[in-house]
Amino acid sequence: MTNQEQVIMKAERGEGLTVEEIKIYHETVKPVRHVYGKYGTLKKKFLEDKGIDWTIVDLPTYLHNVDKQAEELYNSIKARLEQNEKYMCTGNFMEDYRRQTEMQDNIEKEILKEIIYVE
């Protein structure tokens, strides 16, 4: 068994590593870079600013779930608002654009309030 394999096994068992072993571990096991959507990234920033991002055991899964929740909430609110006469298409491009923008702004505010800026 190589030194690298021994260090990885030791780390997986939760045993303490020396500085040299930590260096070997970081060279051997490359960190996974997670990419989040808009709302996952906003939630991550919010948690970092509050200093509580480290308290979440599986942060990547949590943030991916935030993105999924935001998408589901967006779709449900949009479906509801599209039934509202205030947001229905009129045939006038500028008026329809204004209505769509207003609807998206309202949905965005709701997502930020319900999902993102909540501890």
Image (spheres, rainbow, N blue to C red):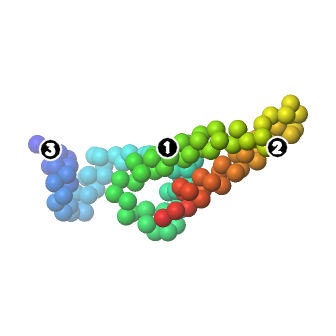
Report x, y in % for residue 113: 59, 59
Which residue type carries mark 3?
Thr
Number of marks in the rendered image: 3
Report x, y in % for residue 59: 40, 54
Residue 119 visible in this rendered orientation of the protein: yes
Location of residue 83 by image quarter: top right
Which residue type carries mark 2?
Arg
Instruction: Pick whichever of labels 3 and 2 is earlier in the sequence.
Output: 3
Mark 1–mark 3 Cα distance, whole angstroms, equals 42 Å
Q: Mark 2 points at which residue?
A: 98
Which residue is situated farthest in the left direction here? Answer: 1
Q: Which of marks 3 and 2 is in front?
A: 2
Report x, y in % for residue 5: 17, 45
Residue 37 visible in this rendered orientation of the protein: no
Q: Which of 31 and 50 is in front in this view?
A: 50
Which residue type carries mark 1?
Lys
- Asked if the residues shown at circle 2 and circle 1 are in contact, with their CB atoms under 8 angstroms apart, the answer is no
Q: Which mark is residue 90?
A: none
Report x, y in % for residue 10: 16, 54
SS state under label 3: loop
At horizontal 36% and vertical 48% (from top left) the residue drawn is 31
Category of crowding for the residue at label 2, using alpha-carbon neighbours closer than 10 angstroms: few (below 14), some (14–19), many (at least 20)? few
At horizontal 88% and vertical 34% (from top left) the residue drawn is 92
Q: Mark 3 points at which residue?
A: 2
Q: Name the residue under label 1.
A: 68
Category of crowding for the residue at label 3, using alpha-carbon neighbours closer than 10 angstroms: few (below 14), some (14–19), many (at least 20)? few
Question: In the drawing, does residue 12 fall left or right of residue 113?
Answer: left
Instruction: Pick whichever of labels 1 and 3 is earlier in the sequence.
Output: 3
